[in-house]
Image (tube, grey):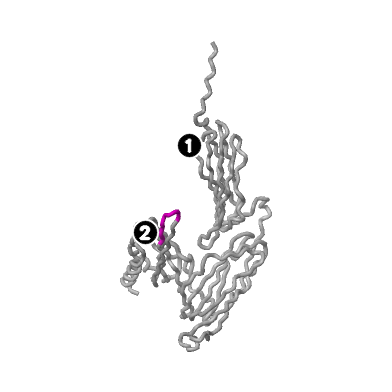
Amino acid sequence: MKPVRRLAMLFALLLCLPCLGRAAGVRAALDRDHVQLGETVTLNLQVDGSGLLAVPDLTPLDRDFAVLGTSSNTSVSIVNGRRSATVTIGIALRPKRSGALEVPALDLAGSRTAPLRLAVAPASPAGGAAAGRPVFLEAEAQPARASVGQQLVYTVRLYVAASLASGALDDPQLPGTDVRRLGNDIDYDTEREGRHYRVIERRYALIPQHPGTLRIPPLAFQGELVDPGDPDTFFGMGSPVSAATPETSVAVQPIPPSWGKSAWLPARALALMLEGVPADGQVRAGQPLELVMTEQATGLAYEVLPALSLPTLDGATVYPDKPVTGTRLDGTWLVGRRQQAFTVVPDRPGRLSLPAITLQWWNVQTGRAETASLPARTLTVLPAAGATPPAPAASAS
């Protein structure tokens, strides 16, 4: 499609979007960060706010990508009577070469997106025999060597060269392993040996609970293909097809014997944060101080994170609030989060010491033990508001 025609179509598409005020922010994200040459990837542009969107200039993409088409979606939410809208523009891209490519920054709605990185591998000769079939499956687990409690990413790809009337794909059943679906299925196109395929990609988080060899048995697909040129198709006479993934194995290492008795936390990143400490380091006796402690780990669910607490403080009373917990998805990784609020009420003027807090964890990217910490702090407690200062001692005659 010529660039001028493509821009005209996108402009017409955006004119159909609801009229919203000025955008508050623009974000760009890829649905995958690594592909094979010949596969497609979707660039999603999200715009918060309202107002008629300006047409994004797609010319910077032409250097390394072929723009195959666009789509849009608008979501509106009302919270406490306040209406907010988010517009998502999807741009289907096909890389023109292999290597480490950069999706350049784009100007949209008065803002500029951040550039993104995409790893494009050469077209794999593997699956050449399978590519001759109308339907086949591929699967891989990353990394191929992990530790107990570490999150793995298991990816299953279904390749379909015809129209599918129906189909069902098994989910992995692995005793002794926590299995979670990672987001929704991803749909894109690719070519194998000159034949066009629609690919449906599904990803799982696998968290092994025991050392040894994790064997992922073949997953089965059962479906029905439809041939538009076959008159029997109109009478539900599709062709049954089946496929299965190859068996996959992962070596799972035990917890290092030198780890000790602290909680085993194999993560890609882990951080401790404390909010609410006065910038001037001063509080008043009897006046509540609200502190919020947060613990966040990439590659771990919140259930395995230790509970947060403050020790008994000399000169203050601590009242913990109800903890807030949850696990969200960041691309292909689980992000567990625990947040605990504390109300600290100083009892008397003087000094109030908040001790240092440390948490040991295992960095799965470097293979080393690390420590997340909050430094010790000392606050100055002033007399209670309205309190009468002590009278000075009388001098001796």
Find the distance from the CA under tag 2 to the CA under tag 1: 40 Å
Query: SS at mark 2?
Result: loop
322 w.r.t. 156: above or below: above
User: Which residue is outermost to the bottom?
Assistant: 231
Q: Which label was assigned to residue 280?
A: 1
Name the residue that disc number 2 marks: 50
Q: Which amino acid does label 1 sit on?
A: Asp
User: Which residue is outermost to the front?
Assistant: 81
- Left or right: residue 98 versus residue 151 is left
Tell whether position 389 is magenta: no
Q: Which quadrant is the C terminus positioned in?
A: top right
Please name the predominant secondary structure of the magenta segment in the image.
strand
Do we see residue 115 in this rendering? Answer: no
Q: Which amino acid does label 2 sit on?
A: Ser
177 w.r.t. 138: above or below: above
User: Which residue is outermost to the top?
Assistant: 397
Q: Residue at x 52, y 65 (%)?
A: 183
Residue 372: percent from the left, percent from the top? 57, 48
- Left or right: residue 84 versus residue 364 is left
Q: Find the magenta span and give its range.
A: 79-86
